[in-house]
Image: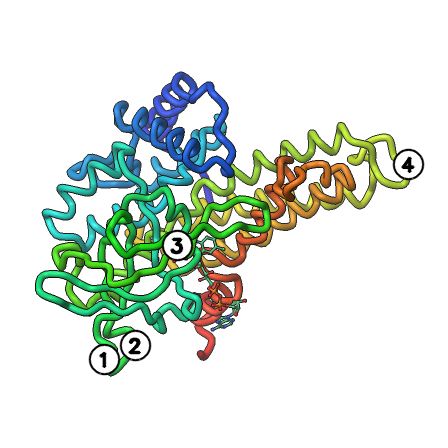
Amino acid sequence: MEIRFSDAEEAFRAEARAWLEANLPCDPRPEIGDLHARRAYDMTWQRRMYDAGWAGISWPAEYGGRGATLMEQLIWYEEYARVGAPDVTTGFVGLKHAGPTLIACGSEAQKAYHLPRILRGDVVWCQGFSEPNAGSDLASLQTRAEVDGDSLVVNGQKIWTSFGHVAEFQELLVRTDPNAPRPHAGITWVICPMDVPGLDIRPIKTLAGNSDFCEVFYDNVRIPLANVVGKLNDGWRVAMATLSFERGTAFMSEQVRLARRLDELVDVAREVAGPHGRRRAVDDDDIARRLALAAAEVEAMRAMTYRSLSLAARTGMPGAEASLIRLFFSELIQRIDALAMDILGPEALCGFDATGATTGEWAERYLTGLSQTIGGGTKEIQRNIIGERVLGLPR
Ligand SMILES: Cc1cc2nc3c(=O)[nH]c(=O)nc-3n(C[C@H](O)[C@H](O)[C@H](O)COP(=O)(O)OP(=O)(O)OC[C@H]3O[C@@H](n4cnc5c(N)ncnc54)[C@H](O)[C@@H]3O)c2cc1C
């Protein structure tokens, strides 16, 4: 196999690199603990990309996106991570799920209203899929919605809604036909404005001391029927489109993010004292061995990413191998973060303030990284997908 980019792709890389280097925000990004300030920062950055024609890199040009090929997207994300550009964070749901879902399944009116606002960084979206008793088994969701005139009336509860308290809109899954023969059949995907009467948003404090996700309660919340995406009771099909965007090629930039994180950790291991009286952590055999193994695994992840993307570029769609990469990434990043804790030793604990919130970068990465094997499909669910769809094992 020859891994090489074409001349046109190299030209695209040069253009992306030059723009990113010239336009990277200089001011420090607010901590996730100050979510309103983080939102303002993210949206300003999004607007700057929009004004220069870099917003919605994968979105079709007819909807205001860049319309980049898969290889160009890979190059963009590589350059993006290389200069340390900020993660989209609060813009994630709008740009990565809701926008692409509306493009695939929304009405013309929904596209015309929402897509430019998402791309410009005017609005934040959140995702209302999970419930206390419906996570991996999403089709068992119980939040009810009844048709009343030209509205849906929603009652129930969602949980783990990331950025719910700073969002304007939510992609909401509700049960509209409780008597449908199969649980998948009675579900509807609807756009819920987050300022409607009857909506109660309660932030949840996480292990790392932040409140970046919420519980959301619906008490007779009225949503216009015009906000239904697809048809009434056709929400499962729309939700599968949403999840395919979430899972499809979202891993593109992760290999570069991992490589950067590992480089930083090697620097730390050269600076801090090692165990057993070693002058530097990197001089310890076990730490050196684990760093070398992690470096090899990051390279393996890069090779898997390139292979999967070149396959997707030829066949036109991401395969179930995306689950392999997602699983490998989520477990590898946790190993790297755990190694950071071992290298820093008790010093890592200095990164907590009196309220228990993390102030140290590595401690925060370690604690928030524990969710990597849960969000976006748990590691067990990813293994099920690999077993059934990649290896063809019986269910
Ligand atoms: C950081 C983070 C952000 C999130 N953001 C959002 C959001 O914005 N919106 C939203 O709707 N949700 C969000 N979620 C929720 C996420 O989608 C769910 O946590 C996830 O789907 C798992 O569901 P659950 O937590 O209910 O666990 P459960 O489904 O109850 O699983 C519990 C355990 O049982 C295992 N298990 C379950 N079923 C099977 C099976 N069939 N085979 C083998 N093992 C199984 C699971 O792997 C897990 O270990 C977020 C989660 C995290 C961690």
Mark 1 nearby-residue class (10 Å; few <14, some 14–19, many ≥20):
few
The answer to whether residue 143 is above or below residue 268 is below
Classify residue 201 as left or right of residue 292. Answer: left
Q: Residue at x 36, y 63 (%)?
A: 157
Sequence-first tag of 4 and 2: 2
Q: Position of residue 45 (x, y in %)?
A: 36, 27
Q: Amino acid at mark 2?
A: Pro
Sequence-first tag of 3 and 1: 1
Q: Which mark is residue 277?
A: 4
Q: Position of residue 270 (x, y in %)?
A: 75, 29
Q: Residue at x 44, y 37 (%)?
A: 35
The answer to whether residue 336 is above or below residue 54 is below
The answer to whether residue 269 is above or below residue 321 is above
Question: What distance separates the C-alpha of mark 2 from that of mark 1?
Answer: 7 Å
Q: Nearer the viewer, mark 3 or mark 1?
A: 1
- The answer to whether the residue labelled 2 contacts the one labelled 1, judged by CB atoms less than 8 Å apart, is yes
